[in-house]
Amino acid sequence: MGELEELRSLMEQEEERLCRLAVGVARWADGVLSHWPQPDVQEFLVGDPWLFLLRASVSRQAESLRISSAVFSQTGQAHLLGAFVRKSFEELVWLKYLRTLPVDQRRKVVHAFAAFELGFLARGQLQSLGGKQMKKIGFEAKFIDALAARGKESREELAEEAVNLGWAEDGDGKFTPPSVATLARSVGLSSEYQDVYDSSSRSVHFSISESLRRGSVSDNGVTIFDQSLSTFEQNCFVIDRQMAMISKLVMYAHEEVRGLELNVRERPRRDGQLFYNPGKVPYLNVWDFRKLEP
């Protein structure tokens, strides 16, 4: 077996291992969710909405992990799902930050953000589709106006609360929600921010360096390719960091909230782990084989 064939065999083994572990972690998260209390509407409205947000995030991340694993194994293009990693990290950061606030303040911020976003989305959809089309899909003008009005009120409520929370003001004197970098520092996730957020940002924004990674220079010119050894590493990054984020989130919630029992029946037993331990299961670093790039 030549050097290239041996490398391909190692990559196939690594792909199978990561995908198997990803499915196991997703199944473990589902098992944990099944043992956590199910919040009701009343709890969200007048109680603590944090558990609702937590369940929604863990559920979404488990499903995203399954999708990334399937895309990796079936197409080898999981690197195109870098936005999943970014969103998972933002959820972890915001959930940890919201947990630091008193319950009353946390509820006020969550409700205000929800109303503000709904009003903004309704107005945006109206501008895109027009009044007639909005009415056809059930959005009467009065309803849209009510959403927009509530959204404006909520922005004012957030502006008032921003003073107590220490949020900065933008140029026109209105509040600016703290950046993910600021929140990450406040909840002790600065190193994860540098690792996860910066890398995943290149997957969701225009990036010249990212475009250049798809080129290979030879005597015949420049070849643009869709898959390469560097692409394989990006695939591994997406799977690896998604497992890290959902594991950190579940374990944090288990330690933080009384009554959130950790179900151990569903777990990736084949790999001998209760949960994915980020950084302890390194994936194949294909930069060791850059000379084999096409």
Image: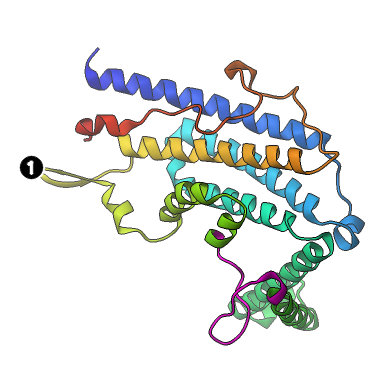
Who is closer to the viewer here, 234 or 104?
Answer: 104
Which residue lies most toward the bottom here?
A: 172
- The residue at 63%/26% (across/down) is 24
Quadrant including the C terminus: top left
Note whether 74 is above or below 196 in the view shown. Answer: above
Q: For this view, does 36 lie left or right of residue 196?
A: right
Quadrant including the N terminus: top left
Residue 19 position within the rendered picture, expressed as x and y whole percent measured from the top left: 52, 28
Q: Quadrant of residue 234?
A: top left
Who is closer to the viewer here, 57 or 64?
Answer: 57
Q: Indicate the secondary structure of the residue bearing disc 1.
A: loop
- The residue at 75%/46% (across/down) is 55
Who is closer to the viewer here, 203 or 109?
Answer: 109
User: What residue span does the magenta drawing correspond to?
Assistant: 163-180
Which amino acid, mark 1?
Asp
Q: Which secondary structure class fits the magenta region best?
A: loop
Note whether 293 is above or below 274 in the view shown. Answer: below
- The residue at 70%/34% (across/down) is 29
Q: Is residue 228 visible?
A: no
Q: For this view, does 293 lie left or right of residue 219?
A: right
Q: For this view, does 293 lie left or right of residue 96?
A: left
Q: Which residue is mark 1?
A: 219
Who is closer to the viewer here, 220 or 27?
Answer: 27
Residue 159 position within the rendered picture, expressed as x and y whole percent measured from the top left: 69, 79
